[in-house]
Amino acid sequence: MKGHFIVFEGIDGAGLTTNSKFLVDWLNSIGIRAWYTKEPTQGTIGLYIRKLLKSGADPFLLTLLFTADRKEHMENEVIPKIRDGIFVVCDRYLFSTIAYQSAHGAKEELIRRLNKNFLKPDLVFLLDIDPSISLNRKQAEKESYERKEFLEKVRRKFLELASDEGFIVIPTDRPLNEIQEDIKKVMKYFLEEVGYAQEKV
């Protein structure tokens, strides 16, 4: 059976890592091979990006670095696993680059042009939350992007992308078990649509 590419997007503190890993664990538990991954990666470029995020680097430079990191990520990890029949669940993807870097001043047209040849996700979850709640969850503002006003701008861009691109929007200002039940419902429908046996899900 063919693998698939599932992406989680949203502002910081929306629960991306928790829910991405939940979905991977759930898929594996029902006999579907799944793999968790994240952008920026833990590779050389990704680690450099993480350092720059703490100092508020130029959005054009960050766009180039995110694109380079994504190229390595796709070629070395994501595409080979999908070809091997694995569901790859990615914690952030190119839509984060669009939302964050365009909100910070980079041209969206340029970001899209640089990323036009990358793999299109089969399904995108947008975990949506008010920045006031997300910042309270994270407590310490460790990165320059974690300012309330900035995150409000990023959130608006994510919601715009969700409308244009057909993302599944999941509100995350509620109990975790409710959020994850909604994620499972969407995935069960998706699995049926792509031909997985009903008894598996």
Image: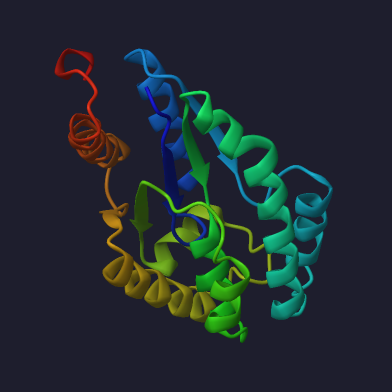
Front position in the image: 21 or 39: 39
Whole-percent x, y for residue 144 in the image: 68, 71
Q: Residue at x 40, y 61 (%)?
A: 133
Residue in the image at 52% along x and 59% along y: 12
Which color scheme is applied? Answer: rainbow
**Is residue 15 shown to the viewer in this render?**
no
Screen quadrant of the C terminus? top left
Q: Looking at the picture, how far across and down is residue 121, in whole percent?
A: 42, 50
Depth check, front residue: 123 or 168: 123
Q: Looking at the picture, how far across and down is residue 70, in whole percent?
A: 66, 53
Taking the image as shown, residue 119 lies to the left or right of residue 201, namely right
Q: In the picture shown, does residue 171 fall above or below 26?
A: below
Q: Is residue 137 above or below residue 31?
A: below
The quadrant in which residue 14 appears is bottom left
At x 72%, y 54%, the residue is: 69
Picture quadrant where residue 103 is located: bottom right
Tell me: residue 84, above or below residue 29. Answer: below
In the depicted view, which residue is nearer to us: 36 or 86?
86
Residue 92 seen in render: yes
Give the vertical position of 21 relative to 104 (above or below).
above
Q: Position of residue 148 (x, y in %)?
A: 51, 75
